[in-house]
Amino acid sequence: MAIDHDCSCNKNPLLPSLCRVIDVKQETPDVQTYTIQTLDGRKPFSPLPGQLAMVSLLGVGEAMFSITAQGEDYIQSSIKRTGLLTEAFHEMQPGQEIGVRGPYGNHFPIDDLKGKDILFIGGGIGIAPVRSMIRYAFEHRDEFGHLDILYGARSKSDICFKEDVLENWPKEKDTNVYVTTDVPSDDWDGHVGFVPSYIEEVGFKPEGKKVVLCGPPIMIKLSSESLLKMGFQKEDVVTTLELRMKCGIGKCGRCNIGSKFVCLDGPVFTLAELDELPDEK
Amino acid sequence: MSVKKDNNWEPVILAFCCNWCTYTGADLAGLNRMKYPENVRVIRVPCSSRVNPQFIIRAFQKGADGVLVCGCHPGDCHYATGNYYTRRRFMLMKRLLEYNGIDPKRFQAKWISGSEAAKFRDTVIQVSAEIKALGPNTKFVGTYAPQNAVEGGQE
Amino acid sequence: MILAKKDLDQALGILSQDAEVFVPIIELIEDKSGIKEPAFEKKFMPYFEGAAVGLDNFNTVKPPKDVLFPNVEKLYKYKTGENAYIQEILPEDKPKVLFGVRPCDMRSIDSMDKVFFTKEYVDSYYAKRRDLVTIVAIGCLDTQRTCFCDSMGIDPNDAPTADVMMNVTKTSRTKACPVTGCTIPEDDGSYILEARTEKGQALLEKIKALCTEDGSEEACKDTVCKLKIEKDPKLDEKLSTMFEHPIWDKITKGCIGCGTCTFVCPTCYCFDIDNENYGAEGCKYRCWDSCMFSDYTRMAGGANPRPTKKERLRNRYMHKLSYFNERYGETLCVGCGRCIENCPAHLDISEFIEKASKVDADAKEYSEADFAGKEAR
Amino acid sequence: MAYTKEQIQEMIRQEAKKALATGEVSAVVGWTSTRFEDRTKPFFAETESECDLLVWNEYCINGTAKYALDDRYPEKKLAVIARGCDSRAINRLIQDKQVKRENLYIIGVACDGKDNPICKECQHKNPLTFDVLVGEEVEEQINADRFAEVLAFEKLTPDERYDYWAKQYDKCIHCYACRNACPACNCIECYADQYRTGWQGKAADREQNQVYGLTRVYHVGDRCIECGECERVCPMDLPIMRQTRKMLKDINDLFGDYECGLPDDRKPVLGEYKLEDPDEFM
Amino acid sequence: MARIGVFICHCGTNIASVVDVERVAESAKTMPGVVFATTYKYMCSEPGQAMIKESIEQYNLDRIVIGSCSPRMHELTFRKMLKGTKINPYMLEIANLREQCAWVHTDREKATEKAIGLVQMSVAKVANNKPLTTSTIPITKRALVIGGGIAGMQAALDIADCGFDVTIVEKEPSIGGHMVMLDKTFPTMDCSACISTPKMVECNAHPNITLKTSCEVEKVSGYVGNFEVTIKEKAKYVNHDLCTGCGLCQTKCPTKVTSEFDQGLSKRPAIYIPFAQAVPSKPVIDANACLKLTKDKCGICEKVCPIGAIDYKDEVSYTTEEYGAIVIATGYELVDWAEMYPEYGGGKYKDVITGLQFERLVNASGPTEGHIVRPSDGKEPKDVVIVKCVGSRDPKKGKSYCSRACCMYSAKHAHQILDKIPNSRVYIFYMDVRTPGKGYEEFYDNTRRDGAQYIRGRVSKIYKEGSKLIVRGEDSLIGKPVTVEADMVILATAMEPSPTVADVANKLGIAIDADRWVTEAHPKLRPVETQTNGIYLCGTCQGPKDIPDTVAQGSAAAAKVAALLCHDEMETSPMISFVDPNKCSGCGFCEGVCPYKAITMVEYAGRDGNRRVTKTVAQVNEGLCQGCGCCNAICRTGCIDLKGFTNDQILKEVDALCL
């Protein structure tokens, strides 16, 4: 006898809804941000910060991306060109129809973060999921304490969301923004150096502070080490994982780490939670 | 795959033609206003040795009724030796396809030089007639063509 | 209810009238060249008149899971460009009967149910198929040498979650199958059928006329598995501490990285999603995938969290024996023995279970020689 | 005087121990027993005591050579116990530049024919390449009927042939055991795993199985060493060698006698040409 | 997703009269990726091109398909047009609606259907096109000429005169080749040495020419403009930097061996200058003959040399130099007739000689100082038989081709004999007389007038009776057997390529035919180029020819070289193969089938699983690759692909075929 399940009223979780890309923005030479809307001009769904969307380029393929921002009637996703599929994504033009399903996965622990100071750390395209949380914090500014944003990119031209990072966010109240690049360049007069060392250089104080950390695996690893060295607790640092995902609903099997599925139980984990999982990330 | 079976049925024949000989020969047939059946579609490749046998399988899978590979005569290859490899490759492939049940007339290879417009025309006429006599190809045709999905349902 | 063996074909015929009846059938692939003997294949396929039904004691190579979770399943079709659309393709409404499912396979379907029905999302495709299927399970009369379901806590004589349970009567005699040589009940034997659910009840209603109600017949329920293994009852917990154990290096060495074990496994449910295009139109489908394939977890940039067969096989075994327990509360290996029988490299999950049960979870070294006594002939 | 199985087994164990003792060898690949009497499994002996688990009997049927590809960039040598077919497989891998001879230590042992139908057709029971030979060489036989199966099958009508294969490909479950067991299938990344490039879909339906089946023959046909592993490992019992042998037969018919995996530096047939090759495309 | 524009050309009425172009355009609008489709009277016209450009802007197109005449006609035109737009010139496909549709069909309905199909395939292909860019490669302004015969010398001189450095590599101790052996040249009868030795001297003296005699090409790598050539210099045992060429050593050397220059008709010492006018005029030691080097005896030359230039310890040396272009001029040899024709005595009769031997006999500087005598007894022959086509035009025994020069030099030989030996009789057995050349027929006429008897037929046997050679053949004109008693027989033996050519061609990566002649890129239009860019040919390495043709080819090759070297850099075609090193297994099959040696196996820092390793992978040399794609079809992983004709593009084209 099969387990009781209600299938008649349940929406097919694998079926995307047809949406339209209404704007394409070139963030860096290899990152684009897409603004997505349903065909009738609505927001496809209302994700919580850190959640994922499965974006399907019909006829080509689909991939999971974090939702980096949302508005009244749109969501935004940023995609970095890494392979054949993302290359095809980068050929998208405004007006193009795509399939979107989601939102998937857990989200940043908003309730835990509320009332605390937050240090946001992003590296490269890793700022994309963090941005959704940063925006949430700004939208609910009074619910959070002091905000620090530390962002590192390869060079100035590789900085994603330049307007936000360099202009908008520094203007927000009670907010410090630190930006660094890996390599110096003529058009960059800011800090030069890698994120982990910059973290130590700034010398954030762990007391009453939560950390949201996102970026390439090696950056996460080294930054975590720096943070722990500085006295942050593993429970207070949240990060996101990225693995190959297909179904998004914890069924197809490939994104498991131990008994957890990144698409369903993740992508947001605290360092303490990650410690519990097998080393297969 | 819906089987196209009516009296007006025309086969779909794919011809891979090397740029330097056969494609030129086919162009020359045009310049000379020679006439041949409409059912051959040419894919231009630099050399017959560019043709991967997997393309042939793909063509049958996608519903081609016949496939033709044409290149320069051995010894005349624009790239010196390409068609010698072509020759070996397709001598074997032809037999393998036949072994798997594909009528040898459905896959043919021919050397046609840039001046042999008439040979190009004759080859097309002959292959077209042969395949027309055989009828639509049903072997290796994709069972998963999406028009099945569009028309029917699951399974 | 008692159904005489000789009436089985008739019963299947009746059931086939308004449902597709999947039953193990011995299919012959004739080799007309006469060089090799004709090949037999035993698989679950729709019943047809004259089919050589093989409800004997050999399990099918392919498990019955594809009736609920097909090898390839269309999800939706779409069109790009002008007049773009996305249109769901759900399975047909046709009811199905899975007839002759062994207890191990029945348990595997239970596991599948857990996967596809629980944890936030219900898989619409699986759900629809599952709802339309009535399952008739059969108690094993004999077991293969690779069968070890009773060591995994499954009774080879009973499948509690089936819609109908079917057992051979105690008085039934057996004989060797003239085709395959395996043990089967003689024609004058009979089956005892017992409905466990409403669906099952409805199914039995249809063949009631063929059955008798003889209370004196007793079901044969004393079958035991040929393969007995010593399994630590807390193996799942033990394994969860053994992720870095040296045993993994050793036991995965022989693996050739093919997908045989996953595709013949009744509980492997991993799938991939891909599409097939036809001009501007196309179709999204899902198909079985195997965690043993190198590209399974490989990411776009080339990095792979499970780069070698060691990590992949470890994940498979851990999934079967530990992860699934943690997530769904039961072991995912049902002891059907298919992977043991079919593994090209003769890897043996039962052997692993035994060894893992015995080893010291904290050992830093592992040698096969420690187990030599038991295996060397 | 011929050695007994037990004697050869003991010699294998001794050679394995010697190889490990040199310190240059990481493991010895051979066979060990399983819980079933009539079955052995491939085994990596890494310590002296594990060498005593190596067995030699008529059930040692798995190929050992392909394990050399598990580590393409090894720090130490891998010792491989090689029968005739394994040595040809090793030659195949060396000729395809996938392993370096110096990374292997080959313990050759003449094969007396295993419990595997293909062994009846074997023309090379003795290892062709080895560092040390265990026991004595055995007499080779010429298999005059090498292509009998192909010849018989060729006599069928095209429709019979197609239907036969279609049924076979209906069975195929796309597990790629044939590929992974085949010493000629030694690409770092198989075309069939490259779903993005669109050579082949991932679905295991008849269509994709046919595409895979034919492509496989084309890819390995001119390099097949006829070890029969593809057919042995197939869980669905597809007659895979019948396809590959067809190509081999045609190669023999068209381009002269041809056998692969011998210790020569002959190029695969499709990688070379002769001006005087037969031509039917005039 | 692509934004494709489709432009269907009427081509006046050429296409439009058979194909319903409007319907094709309408249909194209429904194809995946197409955002705009239109037709126009003449796409290739200026207004047509302007319209395409405007549409690109207006509809934000990123690639286009043009349905028009054959791409062989206007592909370049349209690519040039795209250079002025935001679209890369290679984001273009042309559907051939004229030559392969409208012109060959009459049924309007079916032709239109086909046209739609062709456009569909092009649309599917173009959607997968990638922008391609041409790259430039620098050119080393130096040329290498392999072979120092008349062809090589002529080529070298002409290149050098254009101001480029040239190196001549000659395997013999002197340049000059065969021409300098000859006595007179037909039809003008001027002295061969008199006109070739000045060329040799000029080569030696030319400031832009470096002579490398006793040298061979050892290894060639690189590609057009950038060849790296390793030259092997054989041991000479004489330090040419010191040697003054006084010749004393030659006169004192006790060893005498057969002279190659005199075709075996004389002896030379073991330390020798090959011939009097040799360039460089300095001796070398024949290591196989020298007593010192073979038996460690003698050593006279070292003792007599006034400046101590003898160096018995000399060794083979190698130098590597860079060149932008290479000319192969390895010349010919005569076939070994003795093996082919045992019925002519198989070499055992001394008085059966080759034409080249006769040249030495009749040459004033030859062994007999120009007296025509029998090698056997030194007597003057009266009856001389000349046999033509020995080894030529004889596919059964020799070569199937005609050696071209024999008809004329046989006539010349006849003329010389009749001129120098009073009352002599010359019989010429011939199959045909071929005299295509200025003044050639006249020369032949004169020879006949001089008294040479032409007998049409093959010689079946030559044997000796007493001191006479009996020549038996058949006069096919009268159909009767003929027997001639001769004092001497001259065989006009076939030319064949120098035995070294196969090796050189292999090193250069150029093709030779079944007879080992070097294959030219195109027999009509690219007669002095080889298949490989930057490698040219001239002279008899390509096929038998006479001196005027050889010299003409030498100059032609020089012109081609100069045309290349006068540029500082050159553009390469972007439609070449490329390798995905991450997928490459390094099996090297592609390397084996590449006709241009454009693929080499290189080390690459890749990954194996998650481990960093050094892999061996194929790499395509952009300068050498010509884009044939042979390597693509042999590659099992599909990791080597052809830009412009990628696997993906062709598969998509095939997919679109049956829609």
Image (cartoon, coloured by chain):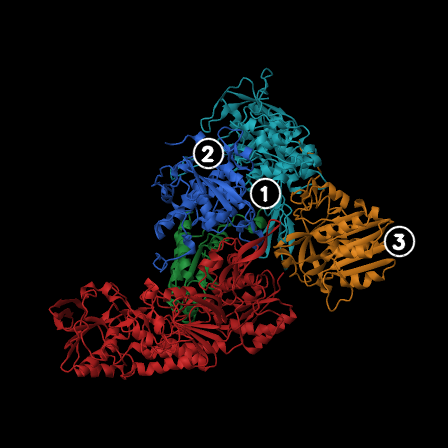
Chain colours: A orange, B green, C cyan, D blue, E red
Report whether residue D180 is seen: no
Which residue has dot 2 on it? Answer: D11
Q: What's the CA distance linking mark 1 and mark 2?
A: 31 Å
Chain to which the residue tagged by mark 3 belongs: A
Q: What's the CA distance linking mark 1 and mark 3?
A: 51 Å
User: x and y percent of residue C224 in the render?
Assistant: 58, 23
User: x and y percent of residue A272 in the render?
Assistant: 77, 43
* In-image side of E348 versus E104 (left or right): left
Tell us which disc is closer to us: 1 or 2: 2
Residue type, numbered disc 2: Met
The numbered dot on residue C134 is: none
Which residue has dot 1 on it? Answer: C309
User: x and y percent of residue C276 in the render?
Assistant: 57, 51
**Is disc 1 placed on a helix, strand or loop?**
helix
Residue type, numbered disc 1: Lys
Tell us which disc is closer to us: 3 or 2: 2
Check the image and report above or below for C222 versus E14: above
* In-image side of C107 versus B140 (left or right): right
**Is disc 2 placed on a helix, strand or loop?**
helix
Tell us which disc is closer to us: 1 or 3: 1
Toward the top, the furthest residue is C216
Which residue has dot 3 on it? Answer: A142
Q: Are marks 1 and 2 in contact (CB under 8 Å)?
A: no
